[in-house]
């Protein structure tokens, strides 16, 4: 009986030792805390990166199954090696949150941004080409508008010159007409003046050379020496009679 008990205890002891050895080989101490040494990570599609991990105890066993992603199809967790979490981005662009969770142990959460750099470059190139085309179109439209404005300004200037020339021509025409009218008026006035002067000269000559008769008494001069029964009238010029304030006789002087 004692031999059976001893044999049973021996088996239990060996089993315990085996479990301890297995635990030492495949297990480790319980995880106390863990930190992902990053805040924001940016990756291209189909790119692999390593993320440093800080945890204690340092020999604690970590499982990739305890690292959680809030979206599928963007990033996958490949392995844990030498305190490095190895991840790989897939073909899909987007943002995903990574965090370690195991029972009551949680790490900080980080954001991983996956961007298709090739597609992004193509998009940027397309935007640049569109911007260039737009700028060229705007430049072309501006040049056309400036050409139109220049042509309109030139046309307006030519019209203004034509109006000014027409105005000057009309003013010159009116000036010539006025000068011609003035010349005609001056000629007419000169002719009239000459005529008047000639008439006055003739009249003065006639008055100077014409002789009339005046009586010894009275203030009338006569063309007939026998008018009004004048006796011994005296012959004088008409100029003399006017100077002496004589008046013509209404009977004989016409």
Image (tube, helix red, strand yellow):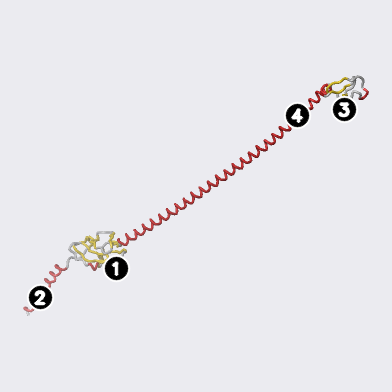
The local secondary structure at tag 3 comes to loop
CA separation in Å, label 4 and label 2: 179 Å
Q: Which residue corresponds to mark 2?
A: 11
CA separation in Å, label 4 and label 3: 24 Å
Q: Residue shown at 79%/25% (left/top)?
A: 205
CA separation in Å, label 1 and label 2: 50 Å
Q: Which residue corresponds to mark 1?
A: 73
**Would residue 188 appear left or right of 85 to someone viewing this image?**
right
CA separation in Å, label 2 and label 3: 197 Å
- Closer to us: 121 or 129: 129
Q: Judge depth for marks 4 and 2 and give the one in front.
A: 4
Q: Residue shown at 26%/64% (left/top)?
A: 46
Report if the CB atoms under discs 2 and 3 are less than 8 Å apart.
no
Q: Which residue corresponds to mark 3?
A: 253
Q: Which residue corresponds to mark 4?
A: 198
* Sooner in the amino-acid sequence: mark 1 or mark 3: 1
Write down the quadrant of residue 135 in the picture.
bottom left
């Amino acid at each position: 009986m004692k031999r059976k008990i001893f044999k049973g205890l021996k088996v239990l002891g060996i089993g315990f030792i085996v479990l301890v050895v297995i635990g030492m080989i495949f297990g480790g101490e319980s995880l106390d805390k863990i930190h992902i040494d990053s805040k924001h990570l940016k990756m291209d599609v189909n790119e692999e990166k390593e993320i440093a991990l800080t945890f204690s105890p340092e020999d604690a066993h970590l499982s990739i199954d305890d690292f959680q992603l809030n979206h599928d199809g963007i990033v996958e967790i490949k392995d844990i090696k030498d305190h490095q979490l190895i991840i790989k981005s897939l073909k899909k662009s987007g943002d995903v949150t990574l965090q370690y969770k195991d029972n009551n142990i949680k790490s900080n959460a980080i954001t991983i941004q996956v961007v298709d750099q090739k597609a992004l470059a193509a998009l940027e190139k397309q935007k640049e080409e569109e911007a260039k085309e737009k700028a060229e179109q705007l430049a072309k439209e501006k040049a056309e508008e400036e050409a139109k404005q220049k042509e309109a300004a030139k046309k307006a200037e030519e019209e203004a010159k034509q109006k000014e020339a027409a105005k000057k021509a009309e003013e010159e025409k009116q000036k010539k007409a006025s000068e011609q009218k003035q010349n005609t008026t001056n000629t007419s006035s000169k002719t009239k003046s000459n005529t008047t002067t000639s008439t006055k000269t003739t009249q003065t000559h006639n008055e100077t050379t014409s002789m009339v008769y005046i009586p010894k008494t009275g203030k009338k001069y006569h063309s007939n020496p026998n008018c009004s029964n004048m006796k011994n009238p005296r012959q004088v010029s008409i100029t003399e009679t006017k100077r002496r304030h004589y008046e013509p006789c209404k009977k004989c002087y016409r």
